[in-house]
């Protein structure tokens, strides 16, 4: 089966002083989704962005904005991100003892619910939540920073999750996040990913955002 592969630039690597412009460049270049990395200084060491950024970006782009919550007790923040305009809210399996409740809250607020797994967390932990989610994000680096090297074992993890989703006839998106570039894009798509987060490969300062997205798209098509 061929599925459309979507590119989700992560603004973590963007020039924050020109954030609106950079997002508009990404949209013009054919990006499909804007990926916002939310970090709280607890679940991961850095502190990054909150709902105010999601709300501001909604004024400069028509693309869906996905909020990747790398925060503890994400259920406390879900509503703020939905009100800010997030199209998908993604919570980490490791971040809350109340994952099911968080997923139900996200869906009740009328947006897509996603769950994410760190590289060291067994894909088996997805089993009981999988029928309830619209989106699964497999981390292919340890969360916290952009620009890290892709963890090769993630390919096998993607294959297993793709089988799990197909096994229950789920149409959930399977997203991969971390170390995605021209060299890794083809392999993650072959392993079953249909949404690719790319931060440092898209906002790299060496070329335009448009040129970077075009190269990534070409690598996906080349397989
Ligand atoms: C890492 C974030 C990623 C990050 C990816 O914690 O979740 O979205 O921005 O950056 P790259 O594409 O540079 O690995
Ligand atoms: Zn992310």
Image (cartoon, rainbow, N blue to C red):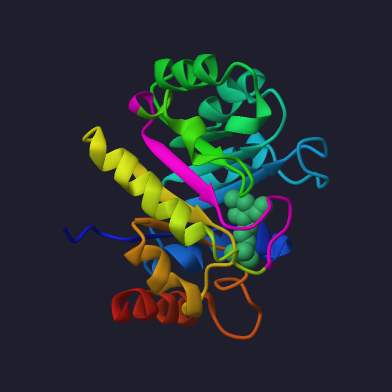
> Among all residues in the image, which is located at the extreme bottom?
206
Q: Quadrant of ligand 1?
A: bottom right
For this rendering, which residue is in front, 15 or 177? 177
Residue 170, placed above or below residue 220: above
Magenta highlight on residue 95: no
Residue 142, placed above or below residue 115: below
Residue 34, placed above or below residue 5: above
Apparent side of residue 94 relative to residue 189 in the rendered image (left or right): right
- Image quadrant holding the C terminus, namely bottom left
For this rendering, which residue is in front, 70 or 95? 95
Residue 56 visible somewhere in the drawing: yes
Magenta highlight on residue 139: yes
Q: Position of residue 1 (x, y in %)?
A: 16, 58
Q: Position of residue 206 (x, y in %)?
A: 63, 85
Residue 8 visible somewhere in the drawing: no
Q: Residue at x 68, y 53 (%)?
A: 142
Q: Residue at x 46, y 77 (%)?
A: 210
Q: Which residues are magenta?
A: 131-148
């Amino acid at each position: 089966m061929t599925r459309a592969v979507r590119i989700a630039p992560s603004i973590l690597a963007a020039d924050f002083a020109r954030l609106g412009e950079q997002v508009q460049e990404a949209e013009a270049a054919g990006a499909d989704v804007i990926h916002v990395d939310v970090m709280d200084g607890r679940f991961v060491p850095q502190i990054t962005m909150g709902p105010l950024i999601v709300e501001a970006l909604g004024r400069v782009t028509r693309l869906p904005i996905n909020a990747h919550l790398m925060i503890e007790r994400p259920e406390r923040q879900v509503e703020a991100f939905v009100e800010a305009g997030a199209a998908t809210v993604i919570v980490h399996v490791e971040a809350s003892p109340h994952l099911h409740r968080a997923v139900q809250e996200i869906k009740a607020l009328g947006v897509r619910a996603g769950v994410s797994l760190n590289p060291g967390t067994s894909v088996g932990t997805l089993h009981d939540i999988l029928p309830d989610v619209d989106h699964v994000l497999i981390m292919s680096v340890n969360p916290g920073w952009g620009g890290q090297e892709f963890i090769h074992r993630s390919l096998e993890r993607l294959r297993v999750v793709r089988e799990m989703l197909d096994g229950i006839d789920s149409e959930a998106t399977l997203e991969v996040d971390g170390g995605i570039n021209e060299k890794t894009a083809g392999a993650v798509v072959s392993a079953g990913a249909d949404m690719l987060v790319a931060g440092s490969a898209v906002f790299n300062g060496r070329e335009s955002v448009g040129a970077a997205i075009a190269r990534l798209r070409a690598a996906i098509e080349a397989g």
